[in-house]
């Protein structure tokens, strides 16, 4: 049977847990590819439900739904598309981080970044209401989220480097790279049929660590920004390790099943 290639979305990190992407994934077999696409369509309700579950609290989800649903319907009524909201949210977060984090205006920058990051809840709701959920929305979210994560952490790294805090700037760069690998590891695992999910530092957790650091720095708390990037680096590296081990266990289980043995 000829091989068929599909592009997958990043893990539910992206629009949930804040969290999706894979570079050049390939699926062997039409049946497996169809399963992946069905999974994309289900998960992609632009992941609004997942993102609203960041705090894993039904009351919080209900609050966001009550606030966001009327706004989503209003935007759809005047012809604004979910993709337009996705792009505006991403661009807003990029500009806010580059304009304010790099110049040390962390309080204003944090409020603006948080506002634009939460727009993911809005475009997800719009996609669900309008029936436009699908692989394209998941793909677009994944790509823009990866860029947003990189620009946010990169802006903090640039600020630290400009203020002669080389070690902390290095930690921020490690956090940036490892954060991208966290998302890639799961998507790449899925692309070859392995389970590389889970971990303590998914996208929502990483954003919380970073934004807590920038908020408190904006309020004048000393050293918290440096602490936050070191915690973020450690959290991201640990999560990469967890996902690699998860994929390894999944691979061993598959090999054992194929050989008719009990997995370890």
Image (spheres, rainbow, N blue to C red):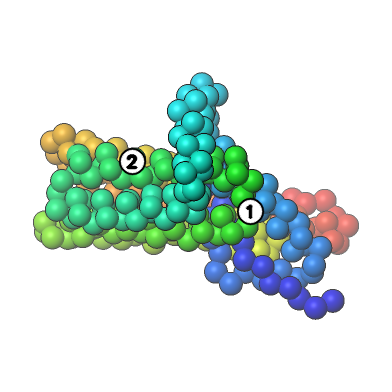
| Image x and y of residue 157, in percent | 24, 57
Which image quadrant is residue 178 in?
bottom left
The mark lying in front, picked from 1 and 2, is: 1
Q: Secondary structure at mark 2?
A: helix
Q: Reply above or below: 141 against 216.
A: below
Q: Which mark is residue 134?
A: 1
Whether residue 162 can be seen here: yes
Which image quadrant is residue 224 in?
top left
| Image x and y of residue 91, in percent | 34, 56
Q: Which badge, 1 or 2, comes first in the chain's sequence? A: 2
Q: Nearer the viewer, residue 223 or 55?
A: 55
Crowding near the residue tagged with mark 2, few <14, some 14–19, many ≥20 C-alpha atoms within 10 Å = some
Residue shown at 62%/57% (left/top)?
A: 135
Q: Which mark is residue 114?
A: 2
Q: Nearer the viewer, residue 24 or 123?
A: 123
| Image x and y of residue 222, in percent | 14, 39
Residue most toward the bottom?
Answer: 2
Q: Secondary structure at mark 1?
A: loop
* Horizontal relation, residue 130 to residue 178: left or right: right
Whether residue 244 can be seen here: no
Instruction: Assign the N terminus to one quadrant of the image.
Output: bottom right
């Amino acid at each position: 049977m000829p091989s068929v290639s599909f592009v997958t979305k990043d893990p539910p990190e992206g629009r949930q847990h804040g969290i999706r992407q894979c570079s050049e994934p390939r699926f062997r077999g039409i049946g497996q590819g169809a399963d992946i696409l069905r999974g994309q369509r289900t998960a992609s309700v632009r992941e609004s439900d997942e993102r609203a579950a960041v705090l894993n609290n039904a009351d919080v989800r209900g609050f966001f739904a009550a606030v966001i649903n009327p706004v989503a319907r209003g935007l759809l009524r005047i012809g604004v598309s979910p993709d337009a909201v996705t792009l505006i949210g991403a661009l807003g977060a990029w500009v806010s981080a580059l304009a304010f984090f790099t110049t040390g205006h962390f309080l204003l920058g944090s409020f603006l970044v948080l506002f634009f990051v939460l727009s993911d809840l809005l475009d997800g709701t719009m996609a669900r209401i309008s029936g436009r959920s699908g692989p394209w929305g998941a793909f677009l979210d994944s790509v823009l989220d990866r860029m947003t994560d990189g620009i946010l952490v990169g802006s903090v790294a640039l600020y630290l480097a400009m203020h002669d805090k080389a070690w902390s700037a290095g930690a921020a760069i490690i956090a940036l790279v490892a954060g991208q690998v966290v998302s890639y590891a799961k998507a790449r695992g899925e692309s070859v049929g392995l389970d590389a999910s889970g971990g303590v530092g998914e996208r929502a957790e990483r954003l919380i660590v970073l934004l807590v650091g920038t908020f408190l720095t904006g309020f004048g708390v000393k050293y918290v920004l440096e602490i936050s990037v070191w915690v973020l680096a450690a959290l991201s590296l640990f999560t990469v390790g967890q996902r690699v081990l998860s994929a390894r266990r999944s691979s061993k289980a598959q090999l054992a099943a194929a050989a008719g043995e009990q997995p370890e």
